[in-house]
Image (tube, rainbow, N blue to C red):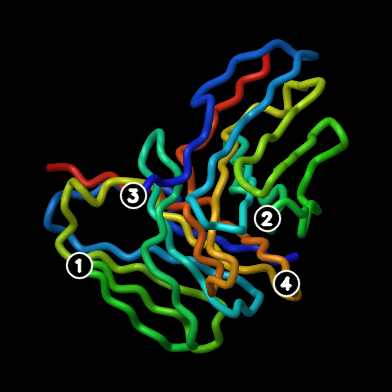
Amino acid sequence: TQLLEQSPQFLSIQEGENLTVYCNSSSVFSSLQWYRQEPGEGPVLLVTVVTGGEVKKLKRLTFQFGDARKDSSLHITAAQPGDTGLYLCAGPQVNAGNNRKLIWGLGTSLAVNP
Amino acid sequence: EAGVTQFPSHSVIEKGQTVTLRCDPISGHDNLYWYRRVMGKEIKFLLHFVKESKQDESGMPNNRFLAERTGGTYSTLKVQPAELEDSGVYFCASSLRWSTPYEQYFGPGTRLTVT
């Protein structure tokens, strides 16, 4: 069974600090997606990483896909209160064929205090 | 362009009652997905439509759940009769037919509470 484990589960930091959250699996994924979810809303796609070792940047957010495509990290530089939210990683189930079933992590709940 | 919309946003029903959730995908999106998040657990896939056809319904918990997408536009998810363990947030998502890799747009969810 494919699983995605995210850590830490909760993180509370001060504005301006840096942080890294992790998404790990014992399984290989063809790609991983990172989403952010705010209260009362659905997940919003931030980025998709596809190639092992790939690094993608989205303003102050840096996403990395592990060389073996079993893990990914999200690094936020100089966090701001607007970064507060639930960060979720997800990836397509192996051997899903034409099906498009996503496997999800539990998420990291981030609070950035002013 | 309007995003994915879901109705209702909240529903509180008693065990044994019936509830129907509705999802309107982004116009032109052939793929439509239903997911559920139970408190303390990860988001779980329920099923996937391509237009009006069920492509994958392997995540449906049991036969108390019925999903339809008549005409390939909006979709409904009916729970009948509801049980306590059906409580959770039900998300709908949609994507273009050939979008890769698995980039889905989510609605705000319907929070279902079964008492």
Q: Are marks 4 and 2 in contact (CB under 8 Å)?
A: no
Amino acid identity at mark 4: Asn
Q: In this view, does B50 lie to the left or right of B98?
A: right
Q: Tell me which chain the residue with mark 4 is part of.
A: A
Amino acid identity at mark 3: Leu
Residue A60 at x, y percent in the picture: 20, 67
Tell me the residue that label 2 is attached to. B51
Q: Are marks 1 and 2 in contact (CB under 8 Å)?
A: no
Q: How far apart are marks 4 and 1 (CA)?
A: 35 Å
Q: Are marks 1 and 2 on the same chain?
A: no
Q: Distance between the residues labelled 3 and 1?
A: 17 Å
Q: Are marks 3 and 1 in contact (CB under 8 Å)?
A: no
- Mark found first going from the N terminus, 3 or 1: 3
Q: Tell me which chain the residue with mark 2 is part of.
A: B
Q: Tell me which chain the residue with mark 1 is part of.
A: A
Residue at disc 2, secondary structure: loop
Identity of the residue drawn at 60% across and 15% down = B12
Tell me the residue that label 1 is attached to. A60
- Mark found first going from the N terminus, 4 or 3: 3
Tell me the residue that label 3 is attached to. A11
Q: Which of marks 1 and 2 is in front?
A: 2
Q: Is residue A90 left or right of residue B58?
A: left
Identity of the residue drawn at 43% across and 66% down = A22
Q: Quadrant of the C terminus of chain B?
A: top right
Q: Which of marks 2 and 3 is in front?
A: 2
Tell me the residue that label 4 is attached to. A98
